[in-house]
Amino acid sequence: MTQFPVNIASDKDEFDPEHWTNPGANNVNRLPARHPETGISVLIVGAGMGGLMTALECWRKGHTVVGILERNEGPVYSGDIIVMQPPAVSIIRHWPDMCCDMEEEQVHAAVSYETHGGKHIYGPTVPSFNDPEHLASRKGPFVAPAQVRRKFYRMLLRQAAKIGLQVEYGSPVQSYFEDQGAAKGGVVLENTGAVRLADVVVAADGLKSASEILIAGEHVPTKSSGLSIYRTAFPKELAMKDEAVRKRWGNSPPVWEYWLGPGMYLGVFVGEDIISFGFTPRDVQGTATESWEPDTDPEDVARAMLRVPDWDPAVLALIRSAPQGAIVHWPLLWRDLRREWTSPAGHVVQVGDSAHSFIPTSGNGGSQALEDAITLATCLQLGGCVRNAPLATKVYNLLRYERVSCAQKMSFVNSQLKTATDWDAIWKDPAKIRTRFPSWIFKHDPEAYAYEKYGQAFAHLISGTEFANTNFPPGHEFRPWTMEEVWRDIEDGKRVEDLLDGDWS
């Protein structure tokens, strides 16, 4: 198999701060104003997007980032096209260089919806968070429908280097611990047995983080959603060698199309220089494995699609144009959300997938990880000193848990919208096919919310005074839920969207 160059650790020295902080290196380096120092030391485990944004915002909020540990040997540019919702990137308004980078690199793609056979349903349109009535009051940069993950991730790496932060590659963590007597959290490194300490240790190392053992006593078991996803991104020129692909997309401006079939759907992104697709079928006999190894043959994807007949020939041609060694087949597994994201004494805290997994089709996993980062850094700032840092992590947990739980439930709403489509309702009102981006998600400002609610949450944790979050659907009476409950409803023919109380729009 000819290997397409993805999922390979890149040059670990490219983002060495020496290359980015030297005034003589012709670097544009406009740093944000930094808040007064708090004296709180922060060690971050995991240099993904959540970990890097945590590092950036902790620096801006005046904390001392004493390390960023990463298990891989260099930056890994896996992934393809991602959605970043406005709350996740509103904070970029404070970072001038990232504002410029994002405006230059994001993709202004029109969004359309088609049946799998090629009948047009709706579009071109924009994500609902970019409907005109929502733009005037928005803080931060304009958020296009699509971000190229590689470019967005490199933007974060560049900015970390510009403020002097070094990612320590090849540093897998074996275990987490906290020393209440010393008021420190810590990790033990797998390769050397070395111990690293900080006032707050942030576990941003993703699924199956060793921090779960400290916080929950065990790894939360996964549960199948019954779906899997085939994902890839590759150079556009490869696809354009096929006549059917050229005829359909050869002269197309950037587009993001959803092709909907019975029990499955395909997302196709055509940019200026790349093609990406994500195909989500029922997972036959658990054939997918939880790995980002790109080892799937394009013909396997075509065969999975052809379990449903009458696909548009151009779509099948596009699938078959993908290079060998570029397609990931990932099961859409679920982990029930835990309420606790901090260690007992609060010195170890989780962000992103370490705390809450989102299935890759949710369009919200990366956004919620960045919201976590912003909220945590702000809570530590409001804690103000080392002594208050552990309680600040628990305030962060309190502010985030219910919102994330509701955001997770929206994943099932959007999945049903595309795999169990109510065609009678859609043909009467085609606009109803649009992916749901609720206003309670995209109008949120995580930094402002932390400033507003920190005092009330602090009092609740200290003295038990009443506290209510307002960052989830208005009128919703929150209660925890499980995957089994949702699937029972789905198997009974119920639509998740119809069972939601309050205003989820």
Image (cartoon, rainbow, N blue to C red):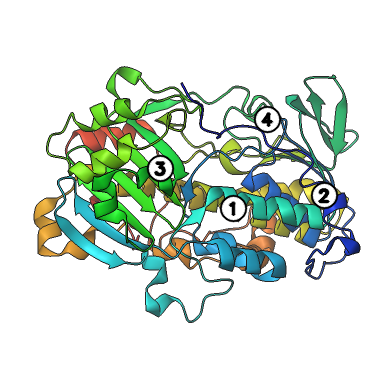
Q: Determine whether 2 is above or below 53 in the image.
A: above
Q: Name the residue: 70% across, 48% down.
A: 52
The numbered disc on residue 238 is 3
Q: Tag 1 or tag 4, which sits nearer the N-term?
A: 1
Q: What whole-number distance in Å separates the C-alpha atoms at marks 1 and 3?
A: 20 Å
Kindly identify which residue carries mark 4. Answer: 211
Tag 1: Cα neighbours inside 10 Å, few (<14), some, or many (≥20)?
some
Q: Outermost residue toward the bottom?
A: 136
Which one is closest to the eye, mark 2 or mark 4?
2
Q: Tag 3 or tag 1, which sits nearer the N-term?
A: 1
Which one is closest to the eye, mark 2 or mark 3?
3
Q: Answer with left or right where residue 497 lies relative to residue 103.
A: left
Q: Nearer the viewer, residue 210 or 386?
A: 210
Tell me the amino acid under the disc marked 3: Leu
Query: Under tag 3, what secondary structure?
Result: helix
Q: What whole-number distance in Å separates the C-alpha atoms at marks 2 and 3?
A: 38 Å
Q: What whole-number distance in Å separates the C-alpha atoms at marks 2 and 1?
A: 19 Å
Query: Under tag 4, what secondary structure?
Result: helix
Kindly identify which residue carries mark 1. Answer: 151
Q: Name the residue: 21% across, 62% down.
A: 122
Q: Tag 3 or tag 2, which sits nearer the N-term?
A: 2
Which one is closest to the eye, mark 2 or mark 1?
1
Tell me the amino acid under the disc marked 4: Ser
Q: Tag 4 or tag 3, which sits nearer the N-term?
A: 4
Q: Nearer the viewer, residue 416 or 382?
A: 416
Q: Name the residue: 84% across, 52% down.
A: 19
Q: Answer with left or right where residue 420 lies relative to residue 295.
A: left
Q: Is residue 503 among what the camera can see?
A: no
Query: Under tag 2, what secondary structure?
Result: loop
Tag 2: Cα neighbours inside 10 Å, few (<14), some, or many (≥20)?
many
Q: Position of residue 470 (x, y in %)?
A: 50, 63
Tag 4: Cα neighbours inside 10 Å, few (<14), some, or many (≥20)?
many
